Amino acid sequence: NVEKARKHGGSEEERKTWFPRRIQDLDHTPSNTLSFGTDLDPDHPGFNDPIYRKRRKEIIEIAVNYRHGQPIPKVEYNTEEVATWSTIFRHMTQLHPTHACLEFNNMFSLMVEHCGYKENVIPQLQDVSDFLYSRTGFTLRPVAGFLSFRDFLAGLAFRVLHATQYIRHSSKPMYTPEPDACHELLGHAPLLADASFADFAQQIGLASLGVSDECIKRLGVCFWYTFEFGLCRQDGKLRAYGGALLSSFGELEHCFSDQSVMKPFDPPKTALEEHPITKYQHVYFVSESIEEAKQKLLDYTKTIPRSFVVSYDPSDRRIEIINS
Ligand code: TIH
Ligand code: FE2
């Protein structure tokens, strides 16, 4: 049993750098999610709302009990949750034409046409997962909250996005300190329908498998400032492609204001930055294009020491290891 082997087998270092080899092994990865109240700031907008906490717990049960291969159970969202989604949907779709990159806007139109994206209904994870699978082989897997970089990136190696299913607290639609379904669906899903961006995400994932804690941290920070908070230039204009910007109208507007600091994306340097997780970022990283970010990150991953090479078999959704 994989879980047992992970906990008891091998040396400390081997246990730490264990990684899933088959997609089913993801059932054993997300052991610890950060949760608000303990790991996250108690100034979380839902912290003092017992009704919200109870609802969130109900939805998280789905992720806790989920096993690979099962359909993701549907959630019947209540009026308050749908209203929060509507507010975010309205604001974000107003900002997309001027703030989001072209690839995102193209894919977003597809989601509206073929995947039921609209203002007054929250899409179900399973429906979005099916759509992404048909486009790029990506699927969604429900998760209870923030994952460690190691566990989150391991999912990307298999073209799996760990996705939360609960909705942020209704008092603060413009920004939430932790991922929620609005973030996954509005921020990440559209770009994962784009073939080139899907490759980009998987490359980061593959590069993370089995590397040391220190290397995971650096790769994770590069992931943070691209996949979550990345910006690029298109036709001389600044455009967001990071999912955490594309699901937060508060942070997107902050980022485009004169209060934010921009630096060129340069993985060896970017990797050493701080990365606040429950506040607006103090710095953002800009690439000349998404392609450029992808290439720079790929070059960077080649400098990460690892004694083997990995390759992905998409028909089996399995990782092959070539010892070198
Ligand atoms: N801050 C994002 C939002 O409000 O949509 C959610 C997060 C993504 C990543 C970290 S927090
Ligand atoms: Fe995210």
Image: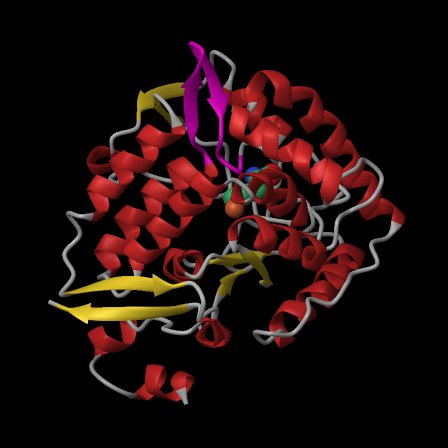
> Which residue corresponds to the image point at 63% horizontal and 68% vertical from the top-left?
63
Q: Does 206 sit left or right of 243 as displayed?
A: left
Q: Position of residue 209 (x, y in %)?
A: 30, 62
Q: Position of residue 241 (x, y in %)?
A: 49, 31
| Residue 188 visible to an observer of this rendering | yes
Task: Determine if the magenta segment contains residue 26.
Answer: no
Up/down of 282 relative to 40, above or below: above
Q: Residue furthest front?
A: 315
> Which residue corresponds to the image point at 61% horizontal and 36% vertical from the top-left?
247
Q: Does 300 sit left or right of 86 as displayed?
A: left
Up/down of 304 relative to 62, above or below: above
Residue 93 falls in which quadrant of the image?
A: top right
Q: Does 304 sit left or right of 26 as displayed?
A: left
Q: Which of these two is toward me, 165 or 157?
A: 157
| Residue 165 visible to an observer of this rendering | no
Quarter of the figure with the C terminus: bottom left
Q: How is the protein colored in the picture?
A: secondary structure
Up/down of 117 relative to 23, above or below: above
> Which residue corresponds to the image point at 53% horizontal and 55% vertical from the top-left?
138
Q: Residue furthest left?
A: 324
Q: Position of residue 49 (x, y in %)?
A: 75, 53
* Start-end of magenta stretch: 229-244
Task: Determine if the magenta segment contains residue 238.
Answer: yes
Q: Which of these two is toward me, 110 or 10?
A: 110
Q: How many marks?
A: 0
Quarter of the figure with the N terminus: bottom left
Q: Position of residue 227 (x, y in %)?
A: 44, 40
Up/down of 113 relative to 102, above or below: below
